[in-house]
Amino acid sequence: MPASSEVHCALAPQGALRATINVGNPILAGVDQGTGAPYGVSVDIARELARRLGAPLELIVVPAAAKAVETVTAGGADFGFFAIDPVRGAGIAFTAPYVLIEGCYLVRQDSPITDNGQVDSPGLRVVVGSGSAYDLFLTRELKHATIVRVPTSPAVVDAFLEQGLEVAAGVKQQLQADTARHSGLRLIGKPFMTIQQAMGVAKARGEAAAQYLRTFVDDLRASGFVRDSLARHGIQGATPG
């Protein structure tokens, strides 16, 4: 899938290909505690794109999805990895999803809440990572519960416990990890949403760049690249798109 000069200039106008890597989502990326280097599915995909373009790769690590969106939209990076959402779609052109992730609720063991439908009730407070896909979704969907926002997704459960809140919302795997860190917590098994993770480029970069990324992701999905990357990093519970 050779890139035209138009695509190459649109995706890597500075020569190097700059990718935002959101380490706030453990399904997609993390940071090696020994070296400080980012790793994960999104890093694998970014490296493959750079290889196909024949461009050096620069990884811009950010702590949360909202920062990734802001960086790409403002031109501080050339592309990123985001959950598809209509709010973000105002400035970002998305590919098809390459990974599907479940968004779930977490409560205390003694909470009377046993079903997702009970969450949207007056007096209940739901803590979310600010600007995350599930924050954007729940902002539209919840009519009675109060949303409490914290800076990043990994901070959700700590805030839930420290502030005595009623519900925590987040990526299922992150919440499962948090239940292993803290006793007395219970995950509501049925997801309240499916998060569609995609690649994205600022719409200002033009349709040719957006279409190249769409074709690139379609090829990765068809070839099994994403499935193999998930397996290599030991990611469970996420489905290739």
Image (cartoon, rainbow, N blue to C red):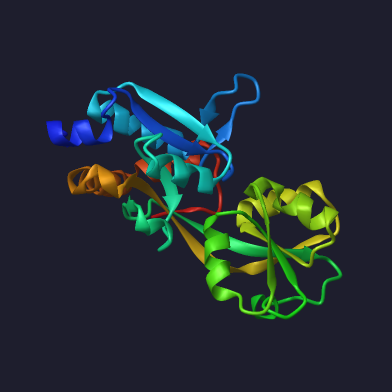
Answer above or below: position of 18 versus 163. Answer: above
* In the image, residue 46 above or below residue 154: above
Look at the image and tell me whether residue 3 can be seen. Answer: yes
* Residue 4 appears in the rendering: no
Q: Position of residue 88 (x, y in %)?
A: 42, 56
Considering depth in this image, is 151 or 57 the residue closer to the camera? 151
In this rendering, position of residue 32 left or right of residue 241:
right
Of residues 201 and 215, which is closer to you in this image?
Answer: 201
Task: Report the side of 164 relative to 208 (left or right).
Answer: right
Q: Is residue 45 above or below residue 151?
A: above
Q: Residue at x 55, y 54 (%)?
A: 131
Q: Horizontal and vertical percent for residue 171?
A: 60, 55
Identified at 43% across, 61% down, the residue is 87
Quadrant location of the N terminus in the rendered image:
top left
- Relative to residue 128, is residue 74 drawn left or right? left
The location of residue 80, given as percent across then percent down, is 40, 41
